[in-house]
């Protein structure tokens, strides 16, 4: 419970970071175990609390999956044939998304990265 002296300004219920990795290593993006391991490590280094995870390898190639975290989720879809991965990191808590995404960029040997960050939820500078 917060006291009167502990007021914090909350502007959103959560933060949603969309990242696109380009120029990735095709073998890394096609390997179910590599993608799963990288995603779990990304969640861990970000400070998130992993609840469960599920990943699927598509034929002939590509992996999609999600790590469910207590704070929300981290999801991925890969296109090895294009050296491309789309990542979605949503959090309603204090996690370091930048650290998590750095793990993925390195694991997939991405040469390029673009990001879009969104605030989610109806709050507008509400004092709590």
Image (spheres, grey):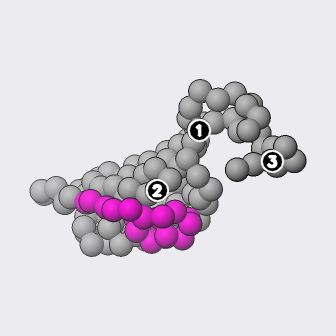
Relative horizontal placement of residue 94, taking residue 8 as reference (left or right)? left
Position in image of residue 51 (x %, y %): 38, 62
Query: How many angstroms separate mark 1 from mark 3 (CA)?
Result: 20 Å
Mark closest to the chain's N terminus, 1 or 2 = 1
Mark closest to the chain's N terminus, 2 or 3 = 3
Labelled pair 1, 3 in contact (Cβ < 8 Å): no
Position in image of residue 2 (x %, y %): 75, 48
Circle 3: element type: loop
Numbered circle sitting on residue 70: 2
Position in image of residue 94 (x %, y %): 62, 56
Q: Which residue is mark 3?
A: 3
Q: Residues within 10 Å of mark 2 (few under 14, many from 20)?
A: some
Residue at coordinates 59% horizontally, 58% vertically from top-left?
95
Q: Which residues are magenta?
A: 39-55
Residue at coordinates 56% horizontally, 32% vertically from top-left?
121
One can see residue 49 in this view: yes
Q: Residues within 10 Å of mark 3 (few under 14, many from 20)?
A: few
């Amino acid at each position: 419970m917060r006291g009167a002296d502990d007021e914090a300004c909350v502007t959103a219920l959560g933060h949603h970071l969309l990242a696109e990795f380009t120029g990735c290593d095709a073998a890394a993006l096609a390997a179910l175990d590599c993608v799963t391991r990288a995603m779990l490590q990304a969640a861990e280094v970000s400070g998130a609390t992993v609840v469960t995870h599920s990943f699927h390898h598509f034929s002939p190639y590509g992996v999609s999956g999600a790590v469910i975290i207590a704070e929300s989720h981290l999801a991925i879809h890969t296109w090895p044939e294009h050296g491309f991965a789309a990542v979605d990191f949503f959090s309603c808590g204090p996690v370091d998304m930048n650290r998590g995404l750095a793990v993925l960029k390195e694991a997939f040997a991405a040469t390029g990265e673009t990001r879009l960050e969104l605030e989610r939820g109806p709050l507008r500078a509400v004092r709590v």
